């Protein structure tokens, strides 16, 4: 999990587009989501979080294949405090595995 989240950034996630779409309603804190062909827009108070994603080649480690997704995050009209809160929740919600 990051410590600070800028207004625009891109990250690689170890999931498929379908998995991210399945997680998004919960990961957004039950905020309204508008589905698009290449992602989704999440309403945050008077602002928006625009998520756009595209599949990458799977990561291969020996016989293991892990899906990868390039995800762009862009906040518009969301103050810094709210942005940090939304992303911390998103990261905790989408966190997988771990010991």
Image (cartoon, rainbow, N blue to C red):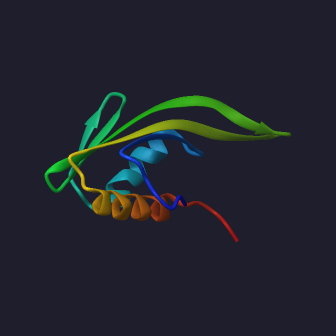
Classify residue 12 as left or right of residue 32.
Answer: right
Q: Is residue 69 above or below residue 22?
A: above
Residue sitting at x 28%, y 61%: 82
Q: Is residue 29 visible?
A: no
Classify residue 63 as left or right of residue 26.
Answer: right
Q: Is residue 61 above or below residue 79?
A: above
Residue sitting at x 24%, y 52%: 78
Q: Residue furthest right?
A: 62
Q: Position of residue 85 (x, y in %)?
A: 35, 65
Classify residue 39 as left or right of residue 35.
Answer: right
Q: Position of residue 50 (x, y in %)?
A: 31, 40
Q: Is residue 20 visible?
A: yes
Residue sitting nearer the eye, 73 or 55: 73
Determine which quarter of the picture holds residue 8: top left
Q: Is residue 21 above or below residue 85?
A: above
Residue sitting nearer the eye, 91 or 20: 91
Residue sitting at x 25%, y 56%: 79
Q: Is residue 66 above or below residue 3?
A: above
Quarter of the rendering occupied by the N terminus? bottom right
Residue sitting nearer the eye, 70 or 57: 70
Count of all numbered marks drawn on residues in the image: 0
Q: Position of residue 59 (x, y in %)?
A: 71, 37
């Amino acid at each position: 999990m990051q410590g600070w989240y800028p207004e625009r950034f891109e990250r690689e996630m170890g999931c498929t587009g379908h998995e991210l779409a399945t997680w998004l309603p919960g990961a957004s804190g039950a905020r309204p989501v508008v589905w698009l062909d290449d992602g989704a827009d999440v309403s945050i108070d008077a602002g928006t979080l625009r998520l756009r994603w595209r599949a990458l080649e799977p990561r291969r480690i020996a016989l293991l294949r892990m899906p990868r997704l390039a995800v762009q995050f862009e906040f518009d009209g969301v103050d810094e405090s709210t942005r940090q809160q939304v992303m911390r929740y998103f990261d905790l919600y989408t966190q997988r595995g771990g010991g």
